Amino acid sequence: MRKNIFIITIFFAAFGLLSGNAVGLSETFKNNIYNPGKLKPIDSILKVKVGEKAPDFTLPSISGEKISLHQLKGEKNVVISFVPAAWTPVCSDQWPGYNIAKSIFDENDAVLLGITVDSIPTLFAWTKQMGKLWFHVLSDFWPHGKVADMFGVLRSDGVSERALFVIDKEGILQYAHVGDINKRPDLKDLANELEKLKNR
């Protein structure tokens, strides 16, 4: 497991993906990215606590399904990745990066749910430009930001924080990280948290 983390970290570093500065997968895609400039790093207060039950939710996926957190209880550990907005630089690198790191999720019996406050059509077009993602991409568009607000990661401007949550198979929140919205989260930290679950 640690060898895989090391190899993936080297790969990300080599392509500038750990810094959050790389943009998109192609020149065409890069030209469609909107750069909002530097934003206030964090603009919310968490409403959930590690060690407590994670709030349940149901959201539409770009696949046409509705995905509920409770569906995964007893089956898989769950990682939730909230990102602020489609078609923005860091978000457009963060999620494709999880394709490269899929083995980390597989080895730790975990699934990933990606959530933004964007609409389904926006998310469909954005992810199609990124290339196929292996995880569910969910829309928290209506009621606007309801799930982000449940977790306490809805910012005052209506987008979500850049946040990661790890929920175990019993539905208990085991890890919560709200990072600087301007930076990509460190993959090593997430991998270490998933490994802790595996070794419990």
Image (spheres, rainbow, N blue to C red):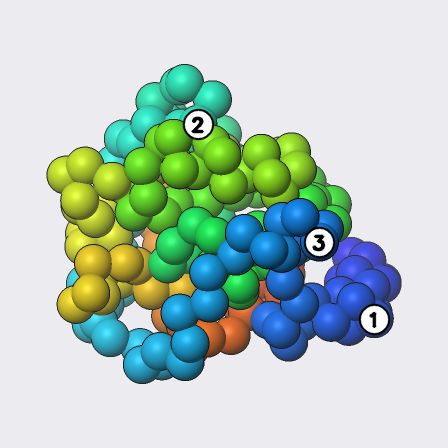
Q: Amino acid at mark 3?
A: Glu
Q: Amino acid at mark 2?
A: Ile
Q: Residues within 10 Å of mark 3 (few under 14, many from 20)?
A: few
> Is residue 164 found left or right of 30 in the rendered image?
left
Residue, x 63% and y 49% (percent of image)?
29
Q: What residue did someone put label 1 on?
A: 14
Compared to 130, does 43 lie above or below?
below
**SS type, badge 3:** helix
Q: Residue at x 52, y 57 (%)?
A: 33
Estimate how packed mark 2 is, as few (under 14), some (14 to 19) or many (20 or more) residues with alpha carbons within 10 Å: some
- Residue under the point 60% across and 55% down: 31
Distance from disc 3 to disc 1, alpha carbons, whole Å, reads: 19 Å
Residue 56 appears in which quarter of the rendering?
top left
Badge 3 is on which residue? Answer: 27
Q: Label for residue 62?
A: 2
Number of the front mark, 2 or 3: 3
